[in-house]
Image (cartoon, helix red, strand yellow):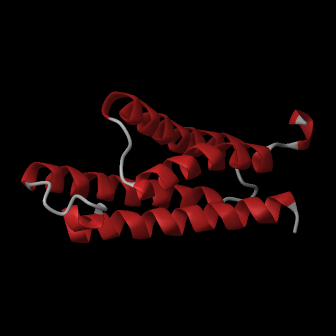
Amino acid sequence: MTKDKALHALMLTMGYGCVAIGLFHVLLGNSAIPGESSAGPTIDSLGRFFGAIFAGYGVAWLQAARRSPIRTTAVRRLAGILFLGGLGRILSLAVHGWPHWFQVALGIVELALPPLFLWLARTDSEQ
């Protein structure tokens, strides 16, 4: 598999995954957050809102993946947003301590995937 095909497949996976996760949070609210089903109406409202935003982020990945050729700038921006989310989890860990184990796993993915996206999206002139 070429880097272009791998990038395209990973972008589609990311896009569909984010849309699904976002809609899951919109529909289930607090129940979608491990260990937080009784967090109350404020967190439920916030979670459903951010679920919609995350679904929109997934749509942005899908739109970027459908361009030919894939625009490196779009990949960099979307990967940077994902990395920023991972940094936010580190900040939360520093301020409040360890979250549910699943949130830790998500943070690792959010910090590990952006460098992979950046590597796959590099053009020949950038290598």
Q: Is residue 19 visible?
A: yes
Q: Quadrant of the N terminus?
A: bottom right
| Rendered location of residue 100, percent (x, y) | 36, 53
In the rendered view, tell whether residue 48 sits above or below residue 113.
below
Residue under the image location 33 percent in, 28 percent down: 95
Residue drawn 40% across the image and 66% down it = 21
- Residue at image x 88%, y 63%? 2
Q: Quadrant of residue 30?
A: bottom left
Q: Residue at x 24, y 71 (%)?
A: 27
How many labels, in total? 0
Q: Residue furthest left?
A: 41
Locate residue 106 relative to residue 67 in the image: left or right.
left
- Residue 36 image position (x, y, % from top left): 22, 58
- Is 50 placed left or right of 80 in the picture? left
Residue 103 in the image: state x and y as whole percent: 42, 53
Of the 4 image quadrants, the one containing the C terminus is top right
Front in this rendered view, residue 71 or 32 = 32
